[in-house]
Image: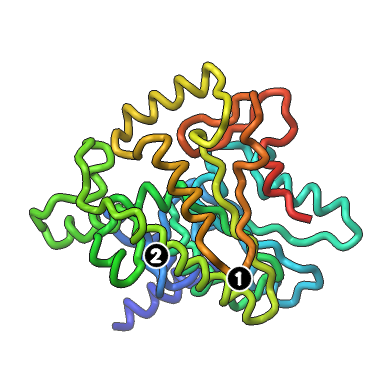
Amino acid sequence: MQKSFQRYKAINTQCKDLSIFAKIFKYGTRNSNLIYYQGITLPINLAAEDKNFFFRNPVDFKGLKQRKKPILALFGPSTIQENYLNDSDTLAFKLQKLENKHKNPKIVLNFGFSGFTLYEQFLLYTSLIYPLKPEIVVAVFFGVDILVGRISCGMLLEQHSIFYNGLLEKDYRDITQSVVPMRYQFLKAGENPPLNDNEVLLQALQMRLSQFNAMVRSYGGRFYPILNPLLPCKKEWSKEERENHLNTLNNFTNIGEDTDIKRNMEAFKAIPRDFNLYDGNEALRDCKETLSSDFIHLTPPKGMKNSHNILLIS
């Protein structure tokens, strides 16, 4: 026991800025794609500077509690995390650059994670970010939610409005040595998953959106939910976008027809709600530039200063 205690003290000295969960991960066997925190699972990115939660940029939680400037917190999937872009091309960077021109600039924080649904964004917010009570919360969603919703467990989605990352299935199956096929593999296999009830999916998404809105507004925060710009909603496609779209269909044969995606988006927008929902497609719908590297990801084109203008909130 004494030797274990001495080792623990040595690790604490070396990693004093890491949480206990991050320390366990750092000195453990890395046989998982996820790190498990209380109430949330976060994808591992060993290249991230932040070793506690693997945010794109480290967050000074202690210092931010004493802040004198308001926080603009960005939530979303890979289209917000944007690990595939240089820092200067990310939405968070561009927003901060614009904010710095104002008399009272906000602090822009990037809480995007690849593959995150709105449900997972909300879990992240409640478990780690809520204590900061950010003045503005922006949640970008829909594309990933549709993809994940189609392969999520129907019982969990219909009865409990739970969307989940498919990698959870892999981890649990590996641990238990189960022979049950993994539903998330259906997305690439081209098989039709049992869940075909779009109304169930959209109602579950609306419930989580209302929950997120209520939590932010409970302390006077402002909530901006934004529908992720999607290639099928863009009127004119460049040659590169058509090629990118074909590649996406080849890799993920079950994402659904373009008309189905647009129909689902319009149906979701038509759901009654007592707060505003913003459509990121409105700013990009008529653009003729190459904006999409696939079905969902925006890539700033050469010669354009900003391909995220729908999200630039004053």
Q: Which residue is mark 2?
A: 204
| Residue at 67% from the left image edge and 36% from the top image edge | 307
Give left or right: position of 58 versus 183. right
* Whole-percent x, y for residue 205 in the image: 43, 62
Label 2 element class: helix
Write down the quadrant of residue 109 in the picture: bottom right
Are there few (<14), some (14-19), or many (20+) residues within 10 Å of tag 1? few
Task: From this view, report whether residue 91 is shown above or below residue 71.
Answer: above
* Whole-percent x, y for residue 134 in the image: 67, 70
Give left or right: position of 87 versus 163. right
| Residue at 64% from the left image edge and 62% from the top image edge | 276
Residue sitting at the far right: 103
Task: From this view, report whether residue 122 is shown above or below residue 100.
Answer: below
Q: Which residue is mark 1?
A: 274
Residue 16 in sight: no
- The amino acid type, in three-letter code, at marker 1 is Asp
* Whole-percent x, y for residue 37 in the image: 40, 70
In depth, the one of 63 and 73 nearer the eye is 73
Write down the quadrant of residue 263 in the picture: top left
Are there few (<14), some (14-19), or many (20+) residues within 10 Å of tag 2? many
| Residue at 68% from the left image edge and 23% from the top image edge | 302
